[in-house]
């Protein structure tokens, strides 16, 4: 979908399709020639039109949108060679092919017939020194010289020797290119160490999570031989959460919340409230110190604890 068009103008939407006409703003398409299994279609959208929507279960190529009074030429590019196709205003395509040294070698018409070919004859390569050129755009991340199973942060490009007098003629090599910026590629190789798993803490207290120590073993990594701790999961048995509340206590290795039990409830005539005494009891019948609170109603006394 394309919005924001000038409503004072008419527009043309054109494309090549291998599966019939698309739906364009409900306007019927004008069918054109068929080339290599692709048919040309054109939709004239009269003004006023502000938005164009192309839809349908079709396969299309060379999609164009332009004012009806305009002409459009489109180009396709290979970043390592240059223009690979030019489509003229009357939708006639020329195709451009290149040899392994990146030189234009063939020009074809819209039926893929050869229009022109180019041959190159070497002059000036009298020395037997290699002359390296791009082999066609292959690239990779440079392996680490000290450990080839790991990588560096250098991009490499494949080159070919184009000097016929060179002993390495037509052989390939990898040439260093740009440095890959931090954040675009992580070349570290983290492996677990023999250090025991530990509990993760925050403010001196367990979080319930466990951590594993790792070390970067890539000799070409900026973090080589550095260590880090990563969370590997939660284990409340091995890493119990803090047990610090006034009503909490560790009983048999488990943090337990005690049961609130009232032991006295006395009416205070001066305040009109009940003064209640209570403590917290745990499953092993241990208890906390006594606490006091006021209540508008009598507090229900608890039953004595029965030892397990």
Image: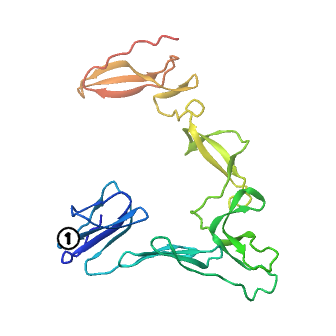
Q: Choose top left, top right, bottom left or bottom right for residue 184.
A: bottom right
As displayed, is residue 79 above or below residue 280?
below
Q: Choose top left, top right, bottom left or bottom right for residue 91.
A: bottom left
Left or right: where 93 falls relative to 55: right
Label 1 packing within 10 angstroms: few (<14), some (14-19), many (20+): some
Residue 284 drawn at (x, y percent): 53, 17
Observer-nearest residue: 211 or 16?
16
**Residue drawn 60% across the image and 32% down it:** 238
Can residue 99 be spotted in the picture?
yes
SS at circle 1: loop
Residue 211 drawn at (x, y percent): 62, 42
Observer-nearest residue: 222 or 249?
222
As displayed, is residue 165 above or below residue 2?
below
**Residue drawn 69% across the image and 47% down it:** 191
Left or right: where 134 falls relative to 66: right
Residue 50 drawn at (x, y percent): 22, 70
């Amino acid at each position: 979908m394309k919005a924001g068009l000038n409503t004072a103008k008419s527009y043309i939407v054109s494309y090549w399709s291998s599966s019939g006409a698309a739906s364009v703003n409900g306007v019927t398409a004008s069918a054109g020639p068929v080339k290599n299994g692709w048919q040309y279609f054109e939709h004239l959208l009269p003004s006023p039109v502000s938005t164009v929507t192309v839809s349908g279960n079709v396969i299309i190529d060379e999609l164009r949108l332009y004012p009806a009074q305009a002409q459009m030429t489109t180009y396709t590019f290979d970043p390592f060679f240059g223009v690979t196709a030019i489509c003229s205003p009357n939708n006639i395509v020329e195709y451009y092919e290149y040899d392994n040294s990146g030189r234009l070698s063939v020009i074809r018409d819209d039926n893929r017939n050869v229009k022109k070919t180019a041959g190159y004859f070497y002059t000036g390569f009298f020395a037997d020194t290699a002359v390296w050129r791009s082999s066609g755009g292959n690239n990779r991340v440079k392996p680490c010289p000290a450990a080839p199973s790991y990588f560096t942060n250098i991009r490499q490009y494949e080159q070919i020797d184009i000097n016929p007098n060179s002993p390495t003629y037509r052989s390939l090599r990898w040439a260093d290119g740009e440095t890959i910026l931090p954040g675009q590629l992580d070349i570290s190789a983290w492996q677990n160490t023999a250090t025991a798993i530990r509990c993760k803490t925050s403010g001196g207290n367990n979080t319930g999570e466990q951590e594993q120590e790792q070390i970067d073993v890539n000799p070409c990594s900026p973090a080589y031989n550095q260590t880090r701790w990563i969370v590997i999961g939660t284990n409340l048995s091995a890493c119990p959460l803090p047990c610090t509340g006034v009503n909490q206590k560790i009983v048999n290795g488990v943090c337990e919340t005690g049961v609130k039990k009232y032991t006295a409830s006395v009416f205070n005539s001066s305040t009109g409230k009940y003064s209640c005494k209570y403590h917290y009891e745990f499953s092993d019948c241990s208890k906390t110190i006594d606490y006091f609170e006021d209540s508008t109603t009598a507090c229900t006394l608890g039953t004595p604890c029965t030892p397990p």
